Image (spheres, grey):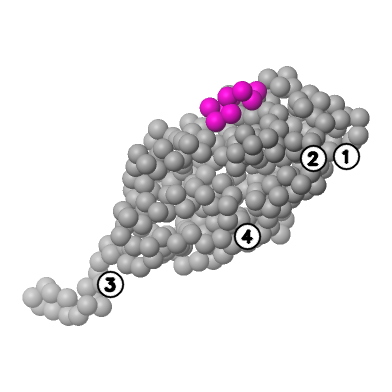
Amino acid sequence: MDAAGYCRDGADCAAQEPAGARFPAHPIRIIVPFSAGGVVDAVSRIVAERVAQIVQQPVIVENRTGAGGAIGTDFVAKAAPDGYTLLAVSPSHVVGPLLNSAVTWNAERDFRAIAGFGSIPNVIVVPAASPAKSLGALLGSARSQPGAITYASAGVGTSNHLSGELLAQMTGVSLTHVPYKGQPEALTDLLGARVSMMALTVAIAKPHVQSGKLHALAITSSRRSPALPGVPTVAEAANIPGYEVSAWFGFVAPRKTPDAVVNKLADALAQAVGNPDVARRLRNSAWTLPRNRRLRSTATSPANPESGPGC
């Protein structure tokens, strides 16, 4: 600045502005590490549409799939920490590194949370032609034919995977895991009866259950889902007290993203999810929304603390 206290040029002025003062100045990308058409993709697009209106910049959803979400996650971990590249996350963000030794990123070391949007349960479903018309019958088949019952998932560490593993552990049966790039690919093989079962997100499963293409055996949450009220919980259907798995969802940014930028993003996302139309669309997709959507920017996981275990 000169003696009069004014900036000499635009570059000097910009350098003296607080971090994030002009954010966002260009489009924001949300990386979804799973396939288009899955629940993480669908929620990201609903929220991104409203955030774009709030920040008055385009918000682009980009799918980078593979390795149970690890490929897209690694991309964001290495992105510039400027708030313009975000990651849509679900349980595999935390669990994946524990199950995959090839993963180089760490959820706590490499990311910081921006916002969480609640939870959604899975529903254990089988193809319509399956002889198993109850969860008890399915588990009976698994006991008589160890390893013969296969279950699909969107990848290692996803809530679909954890639902099947927890079921096997708590009942002592042997199930064979078949991971896919995302829920849409897994659903295709499930509908074709190339896998025996899947703990599929309720929002994706519901239309196929209603059309008769899939048969719902049990909900993975501790309570029945309003989306499928006639379907019992796993605890009810198979007398397994304590069984509970729900998928949580949120957005994170690279760890060194400035506080001012993270706070602006958190405020915009909270406004977006608080919008009545967005909230209605999410609830219609069987999401349970948190009462407080504004998270502390220093959190490492956007899981909603009011939504039960983040599995």
Measure the C-alpha gap from mark 2 to mark 4. Answer: 24 Å
Q: From the image, tell me which residue sits under label 1.
A: 148
Please indicate, yes or no, whether residue 134 appears anywhere in the rendered image: yes
- Nearest-to-viewer mark from 3 and 1: 1
Which residue occupies the foreground of this view, 68 or 45?
45
Residue 64: mark: none
Magenta range: 224-232
Please indicate, yes or no, whether residue 164 appears anywhere in the rendered image: no
Which residue in the rendered view is the most extreme toward the right?
Answer: 144
Q: Give how far across and how far down residue 105 sits, in percent.
A: 60, 58
Residue at image x 81%, y 25%? Answer: 137
Residue 196: mark: 2
SS category of the residue bearing label 3? helix
- Nearest-to-viewer mark from 2 and 3: 2
Q: From the image, tell me which residue sits under label 3.
A: 15
Measure the C-alpha gap from mark 2 to mark 3. Answer: 59 Å
Measure the C-alpha gap from mark 3 to mark 1. Answer: 63 Å
Residue at image x 54%, y 52%? Answer: 41
Residue at image x 46%, y 67%? Answer: 80
Q: From the image, tell me which residue sits under label 4.
A: 65
Mark 3 and 1 residues: CB-CB less than 8 Å, in contact? no
Mark 3 and 4 residues: CB-CB less than 8 Å, in contact? no
Q: Indicate whether 49 appears above or below 4.
A: above
